[in-house]
Image (cartoon, grey):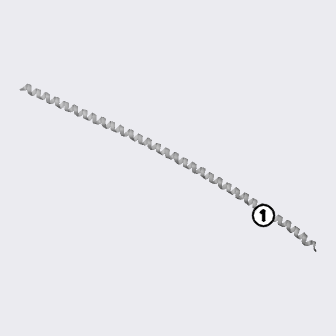
Amino acid sequence: SGSAPGAGSSSGLTASLDVRGQEEEQRRKQEMLRHEEQLQRQRLLEQEREREREREHQRELETKRALEEQRQREEQQQRERLQRQRQQQQEQDRLHQQRQQELQREQELRQQQQQQQQQQQ
C-alpha cells in the first residue's frame, strides 16, 4: 500500500503538467486571437482613413469644379453686361446723331425761310 500513493502522485504530476500545457496552449491561442483582432482593427482603421482621404479629395474636386463654374458664369455675365452697355451706347449715339440731323434740317429750313422772306421784301 506504500507504493500506491507514489504511483498516484506521479500520475497526478503528469495530469498537472498536462493541465499546465493546455493552459499555456490556451493562452497562446488567445494571444494570437488578440493579435489578429488588433491587426484587423488596424486594417479597418486604415481603410476608414483611406475612405476619408478619398472623400476629402472628392470634396476638394467638387469645390474646384464649383469655383470654376462660378468663375465661368461671372465671366459670361460680364461679357453680357459689356455687350448690353455697347448696344446702349450705340443706341444713344444713333439717337444723338438722329437728333443732330433733325436739328440741322430745322436750321436749314429756317435759313431757307429767312432767305425767302428777305427775297420777298
Indicate whether 24 appears above or below 43.
below
Identify which amino acid the numbered label 1 is placed on: Glu
Eyeballing the image, is 102 above or below 69?
A: above
* Residue placed furthest toward the bottom: 1
Residue farthest toward the top in the current orientation of the protein: 119
- Secondary element at image label 1: helix
The residue at the point 87 percent across, 67 percent down is: 11
The quarter in which the N terminus is drawn is bottom right
Q: Where is residue 5, by image quadrant?
A: bottom right
Q: Compared with residue 25, is residue 94 higher up or lower down, i.e. above or below? A: above
Nearer to us in this view, 62 or 24: 24
Question: Label 1: which residue?
Answer: 23
Identify which residue is drawn at 24% across, 33% down.
Answer: 98
**Relative to residue 99, is residue 82 drawn left or right?**
right
Between 45 and 114, which is closer to the camera in this rendering?
Answer: 45
Query: Would residue 9 appear left or right of 113 to someone viewing this image?
Result: right
- Residue at the location (49% across, 46% down)? 63
In the displayed structure, does residue 77 sit left or right of residue 94? right
Which image quadrant for residue 104? top left
Q: Position of residue 100 (x, y in %)?
A: 22, 32
Identify the residue at image location x=8%, y=26%. 118
The reply, left or right, for residue 23 in relation to residue 71 is right
- Where is residue 113 shown, x and y percent of the image? 12, 29
Q: Quadrant of residue 92?
A: top left
Label 1 crowd bin: few (<14), some (14–19), many (20+), radius 10 Å:
few
- Residue 65 lies, in percent from the top left, at 49, 44
Residue 44 screen position, x and y as percent: 64, 54
Frontmost residue, 55 versus 14: 14
